[in-house]
Amino acid sequence: MRAKPVGEWHFLALWIKQEELVAMNEEIEAIIRKPDASEWLKNALEQALCRDIVDAANDAEILNNLLAQRLKDHLCSEIEAKIDAAGHSLRTAARFTGISHAQIVAIRKRKIKHLSTKSLINVAKQYQAALDLPPV
């Protein structure tokens, strides 16, 4: 039976992992130095570098989920307000946006887990573009 490789191989594996971490830290530092990056993001990254990596990643995931849901709720409200302001039925709104009536109903009821943020942004843009068209 062969023994597990140790010594040089173990050192090499640790060195490679350390190099990956250094490269990631350099990428974070580059964002912090960017003049067009927001102060909020720069501060969050600076603080994350001083924290336990796992704790920082877990907190970032929670923050991402909360902010994504907040954005989805905002986009739904915006789409809903445009539909109401235009006096359109949900079927008409669906026709203007190119998505299904069921999806428009889901937006209205806030049952949107299946819709990505990108999809909602596209719906909002398509509906706004449709409203900006001259009446037929």
Image (cartoon, rainbow, N blue to C red):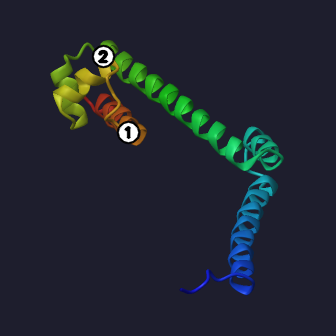
Residue 16, position as x, y percentages in the image: 69, 76
Query: Who is closer to the viewer here, 135 or 78?
Result: 78
Sooner in the amino-acid sequence: mark 1 or mark 2:
2
Q: Is residue 28 above or below residue 44?
A: below
Amino acid type at mark 2: Lys
Q: Which residue is mark 2?
A: 109
- Foreground residue, 129 or 25? 25
- Residue 54 badge: none
Seen in the picture, residue 14 relative to 38 is either above or below; the reply is below
The amino acid sitting under disc 1 is Ser
Q: Residue 50, image x and y in percent?
A: 84, 47
User: Which element is circle 1 on?
Assistant: loop
Tag shown at residue 116: 1
Q: Could you classify mark 2 by the number of other residues whose Cα lies within 10 Å: few (under 14), some (14-19), or many (20 or more)?
A: few
Q: Quadrant of residue 86?
A: top left
Label 1 and label 2: CA atoms lie apart by 16 Å
Q: Quick one: quadrant of the C terminus?
A: top left
Taking the spot 77% from the left edge, 64% from the top edge, the residue there is: 26
Please give left or right for residue 36 compared with residue 110 in the image: right
Taking the image as shown, residue 109 lies to the left or right of residue 35, namely left
